[in-house]
Amino acid sequence: MLIILAVMSMIIGNLAAIAQTNIKRMLAYSTISHMGFMLLGIVSADGNGYSSSMFYMVVYVLMTLGIFGMIMLLSREGFEAEKIDDFKGLNRRNPWYAFITLLLMFSLAGVPPLVGFYAKLAVLQAVLNAGYVWLAVVAVLFSLVGAFYYLRIIKLMYFDEPESDAPILPSGDVKLLISTNGLAVLAFGLFPQALMALCAYAIQQST
């Protein structure tokens, strides 16, 4: 049952996300696919798999907080950034926030050396250790499908003309929080051992 849920989550989530033009809906469907990945660790039914799933969940929350922070940052009085096209030309409006969004999108897509890559790698290793080679192959294939709609955002930010020239002027605390979140994705990707060890310790204590 868990295998069926995991595979169907990855299939439905990724295919539905590709068709979206609303950034929030795209992220909602992508969440379904990420939960399919998280279930893979549980399928392995051992401590390593459980800690991998927990690591994946913590990492996903970190990445999602960052990207929704960027959506809120692009919103302004009388305008709510909901469309994917709202990210067009972000690099011209503010290169720093475009870079933070790039880190978050690459991490969600599972591109090394960002922490999203190590989250997926940890889950796939747990699945392989449990003997489900075919399941790992399916997960990798749909991870590639999912990379398409994340990379589409990056293309819009760096290669398209902006639809609005409105300046992005957040308060200092908002700028600090979003920057810290984005850079944490990179830092945990370069040094994932501490967070992975913490997740493994939490699973050991719960059992």
Image (cartoon, rainbow, N blue to C red):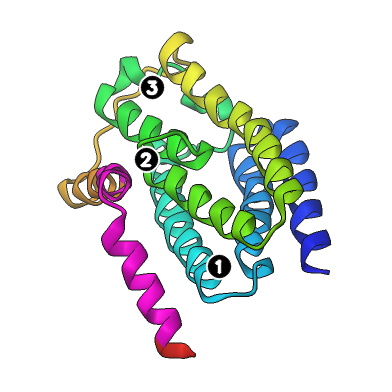
Q: Which residue is mark 1?
A: 49
Q: Residue at x 47, y 39 (%)?
A: 78
Image location (x, y in percent) of residue 179:
24, 43
- Closer to the chain start, of discs 3 and 1, is 1
Q: Nearer the viewer, mark 2 or mark 3?
A: 2
Circle 1 crowding by C-alpha within 10 Å: few under 14, some 14–19, many from 20 = many
61 to the left or right of 42: left
Q: Can residue 197 be found in the magenta stretch?
A: yes
85 to the left or right of 13: left
Q: Which residue is mark 3?
A: 90
1 to the left or right of 37: right
Per the rendered image, the range of residues in magenta is 182-204
Say which amino acid is labelled 1.
Gly
Say which amino acid is labelled 2.
Leu
- Closer to the chain start, of discs 1 and 2, is 1
Circle 3 crowding by C-alpha within 10 Å: few under 14, some 14–19, many from 20 = many
Number of numbered callouts drawn: 3
Q: Residue at x 70, y 35 (%)?
A: 141
Circle 2 crowding by C-alpha within 10 Å: few under 14, some 14–19, many from 20 = many
